[in-house]
Image (cartoon, grey):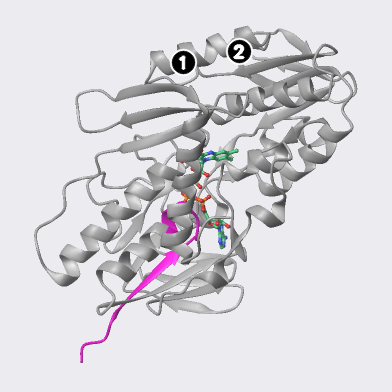
Amino acid sequence: MLARTHVVILGAGFGGLELASRLSAQLADLVHVTLIDQNDSFIFGFAKLDVMFGRRTMDEVRIPYRNIASPTVTFRQEKIVSIDPSDKRVVTNAGEYSADVLVVALGADLAPEATPGLPECGYEFYSPAGAARVHDLLGGFSGGNVVIAVLGGFFKCPPAPYEAAFMLHDQLVRRGVRDATTIHLVTPMGKPIPISDETSDAIIGLLDERGIRHSHGSLITALDPAKRIAHLRDGQELPFDLFLAVPVHRAPAVVVESGLTEDGWVPVDPATFETRFPGVFAVGDVTSAPVPRAGVVAEGEAATVADVLTARLAGGPSPAPYAGEVICYVEMGDDTIGKVDVNFLSGPAPVAAFTPPSLALADDKRGFAATRRARWFGVPSA
Ligand SMILES: Cc1cc2nc3c(=O)[nH]c(=O)nc-3n(C[C@H](O)[C@H](O)[C@H](O)COP(=O)(O)OP(=O)(O)OC[C@H]3O[C@@H](n4cnc5c(N)ncnc54)[C@H](O)[C@@H]3O)c2cc1C
């Protein structure tokens, strides 16, 4: 019997989990997968907003990796400390792995320290710990100037800062302190969703309706912890009582040190997601693929890698290149969800169809999470 191909997947987020489950389904007899992540559980990106605004607790949104049931996949909770892409060797805090195929799906790290003053007087809400901290803070917030700021041009989930603004508005209304509060969203992006004017206009309309100020094309470059003032690139100043940040994003240091990056991110062949090192692939937020950073994108890229490996290992024609077809669900206030159906890569320019917010779409979003729980972990969604 031929030895199975050893596929080592670094990172068990959206990209890593989708790839592991697809390889189990498509190549169960030909591969063995080692899936490595530093954490013991997965949390959907959007679940951080649920935690931040008290819809669900951290314990409720954690899905333990021990639930991964596939005999094709071995999960290891270890921290990756070095990657040698030439030899396809990986060193962790607990051992070493030698791969036939290596896939880097380590996501993007947050760098609050890249904005002077932010660690001293602002709060990021993009990590699970950050979202939980902001949840605790909001419980005692009795009014003042809130700034929600995107601090870099390259960040996960373009709608998330707006979702946070709508959910904050609702929570402050419920608590009777909205009238004592200003909310101001500041972002370097020219519009909320650059590929969809329809979605952008809907978001801006809802911000205006709720009295949420917004400054597009504006970048906050530093915070003054003593004066509690944010400094903008154009010289303006913005006072704040509570500063909620989407910090600068960076590829994890272990990826940068491996030599896989160029200009900070991992370049890949857009048809196969192979890096310049043969047999080494990268998917998701860590790449510089010309698509937004989102879980649904990482998932689609992983599906393409699974098809590429299936063609190479089991034979058959090469798969079609990744088309960039995704559905994005957007929290738009009052517990309603809007939907954007996007195709980034098939045509000459991205196309996006917007479905206005409704409570029915909230059920669709729950269904989206349920299918991933079932596919990746074999458990139904709570
Ligand atoms: C508030 C918020 C809301 C969001 N909402 C949505 C949404 O509605 N829809 C959507 O599609 N996307 C959403 N996203 C974005 C989505 O979460 C990410 O784009 C997606 O998770 C990227 O997938 P990935 O596999 O590239 O990386 P990740 O899912 O980030 O996975 C990377 C994994 O690598 C692990 N890792 C990193 N370094 C190491 C190391 N040295 N050793 C071991 N393990 C390591 C991490 O622990 C992590 O599990 C949201 C994000 C946020 C923050």
Give the residue displayed 35% in from the left and 37% down from the top: 326
Quadrant location, the N terminus: bottom left
Q: Quadrant of residue 346?
A: top left
Quadrant location, the C terminus: bottom right
The residue that mark 2 highlights is 207
The residue that mark 1 highlights is 200
Residue 259 locus on image (x, y percent): 43, 54
* Up-down relation of residue 16 to residue 206 (above or below): below
- Specify whether 54 is left or right of 110: right
The disc, 1 or 2, on the residue closer to the chain's N-terminal end is 1
Front position in the image: 149 or 169: 169
Front position in the image: 250 or 53: 53
- The type of residue carrying mark 1 is Ser
The span shown in magenta is 1-17
Mark 2: few/some/many CA within 10 Å (<14, 14-19, 20+): many
- Asked if residue 8 lies in the magenta stretch, the reply is yes
- Asked if residue 234 lies in the magenta stretch, the reply is no
Q: Quadrant of residue 3?
A: bottom left
